[in-house]
Image (spheres, rainbow, N blue to C red):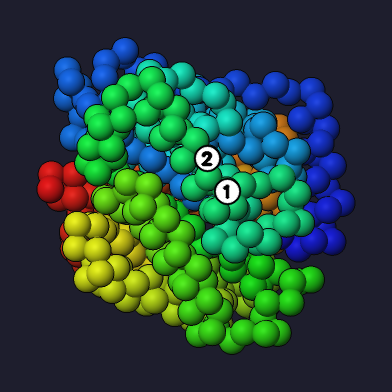
């Protein structure tokens, strides 16, 4: 995710050091012991099952031998000063959405949640993971999307063994399946030195390859019982601090922004085709690219004033090396768009969750998460 020559010398060694002295403190959902069907539960949906990468990982990589970890301060500085494994100073977008759905915080799969916790969903997301299995392999441990689906199948079997299989099957059709994949297939594959992908595919070909695999993976989730999908697009990747640090003029790398647009377009096409062949499947596409443009265009309304660097990081635009252990972050975090070299601040994540939940159909297609939940 960073310049390998700088990253390997500083960041990896720092992570290994911190992992040796710091035990991650998991934050798991404190759920009541009611049935998976939601009896007695006022949530809009029975559960939310989450698949993705570091944007929504909430502690799974804590339990892996991986160089992609956030189990140290100042990560979590605004989460009760607790580094849970979220790549944020506080909350992620799925934390915001879970709250609005009336669900507790969703437990991380590798934190071995109880049946009572799994009834409200499980988070399988893993930093450095991608749609393609070999994406992010230079980080060592990570859980690719295919393996995340395997883990969901294990969860389903556990729930079915402890509850009525009919109730589980019925409630899965009402639950939200949140999938945020694709960013690492570009950051930690297509644009990463040492990976051959960009030599074999132009941006359109690579997007087609990704979405072909993505379609197969979502079809498998459908076969396992998923019917309500929320998919995120890729945001303005050329404008994140690590890309700004690579630019000679400090401005967004428009070549990168343009390269990821075919993925977003292909995902929308996939949704339309999938909905035709599987009419009982319903989708929300979160257009992250448009959302970030919307936030920048309305920055005064939302209180953001710093767009060109991370709140915590090292080097040019605080983006050459990501947030190091015990580094002192900026104090005015609510004003920053980016927390570190790659990830939004908690304030942005909460706003993105609000816009996705009940915002404009210009930003979410073809309906909001609230409308999806109410179907």
Asked if the residues shown at circle 1 and circle 2 are in contact, with their CB atoms under 8 angstroms apart, the answer is: yes
Q: Which residue is drawn at 56% across and 26% down?
A: 111
Residue 74 visible in rendering: no
Q: Is residue 311 above or below residue 90?
A: below
Q: Which residue is drawn at 19% across and 44% down?
A: 373
Assess disc 1: are there few (<14), some (14-19) or many (≥20) residues with their C-alpha within 10 Å of its C-alpha: some
Residue 246 appears in which quarter of the rendering? Answer: bottom right
Q: In the drawing, does residue 345 fall left or right of residue 173?
A: right
Q: In the drawing, does residue 27 fall left or right of residue 194?
A: left
Q: Which residue is drawn at 39% across and 76% down?
A: 266
The image shows residue 86 at horizontal and vertical percentages of 54, 37
Assess disc 2: are there few (<14), some (14-19) or many (≥20) residues with their C-alpha within 10 Å of its C-alpha: some
The image shows residue 191 at horizontal and vertical percentages of 66, 72
Tell me the quadrant of the picture where the N terminus can be found.
bottom right
Q: In the drawing, does residue 281 fall left or right of residue 18?
A: left
Count of residue discs: 2
Q: Is residue 285 above or below residue 165?
A: below
Q: Is residue 41 above or below residue 197?
A: above
In what element is the residue under mark 2? helix
Circle 1 residue: 147
Q: Residue furthest top?
A: 33
The image shows residue 153 at horizontal and vertical percentages of 46, 40
In what element is the residue under mark 1? helix
Q: In this view, does 323 lie above or below 26?
A: below
CA separation in Å, label 1 and label 2: 6 Å
* Number of the label disc, if any, that sits on residue 151: 2
* Number of the label disc, if any, that sits on residue 284: none
Q: Residue at x 71, y 45 (%)?
A: 141
């Amino acid at each position: 995710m960073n310049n390998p020559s700088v990253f390997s010398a500083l960041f990896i060694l720092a992570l290994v050091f911190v992992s040796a002295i710091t035990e991650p403190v998991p934050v798991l959902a404190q759920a009541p012991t009611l049935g998976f069907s939601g009896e007695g539960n006022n949530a809009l949906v029975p559960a939310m099952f989450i698949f993705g990468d570091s944007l929504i990982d909430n502690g799974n990589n804590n339990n892996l031998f991986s160089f992609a970890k956030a189990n140290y301060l100042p990560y979590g500085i605004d989460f009760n000063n607790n580094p849970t494994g979220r790549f944020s100073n506080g909350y992620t977008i799925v934390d915001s959405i879970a709250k609005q759905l009336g669900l507790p915080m969703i437990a991380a799969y590798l934190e071995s949640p109880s049946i009572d916790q799994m009834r409200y969903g499980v988070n399988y997301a893993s930093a450095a993971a991608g749609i393609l299995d070999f994406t992010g392999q230079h980080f060592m441990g990570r859980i690719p999307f295919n393996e995340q689906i395997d883990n969901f199948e294990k969860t389903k079997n556990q729930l079915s063994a402890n509850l009525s299989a009919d109730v589980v099957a019925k409630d899965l059709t009402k639950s939200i399946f949140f999938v945020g994949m694709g960013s690492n297939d570009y950051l930690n594959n297509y644009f990463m030195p040492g990976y051959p992908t960009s030599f074999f595919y132009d941006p359109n070909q690579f997007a087609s390859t990704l979405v072909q695999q993505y379609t197969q993976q979502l079809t498998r989730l459908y076969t396992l019982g998923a019917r309500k999908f929320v998919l995120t697009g890729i945001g303005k990747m050329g404008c994140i601090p690590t890309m700004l640090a690579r630019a000679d003029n400090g401005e967004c790398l428009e070549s990168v922004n343009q390269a990821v647009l075919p993925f977003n377009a292909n995902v929308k096409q996939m949704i339309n085709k999938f909905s035709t062949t599987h009419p009982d499947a319903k989708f929300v596409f979160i257009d992250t690219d448009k959302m970030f443009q919307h936030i920048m265009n309305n920055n005064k309304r939302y209180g953001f004033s710093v767009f060109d660097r991370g709140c915590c990081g090292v080097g040019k635009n605080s983006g050459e090396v990501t947030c190091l252990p015990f580094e002192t972050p900026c104090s005015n975090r609510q004003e920053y768009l980016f927390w570190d070299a790659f990830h939004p601040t908690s304030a942005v994540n909460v706003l993105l969750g609000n816009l996705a939940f009940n915002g404009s159909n210009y930003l979410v297609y073809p309906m909001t998460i609230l409308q999806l939940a109410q179907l």
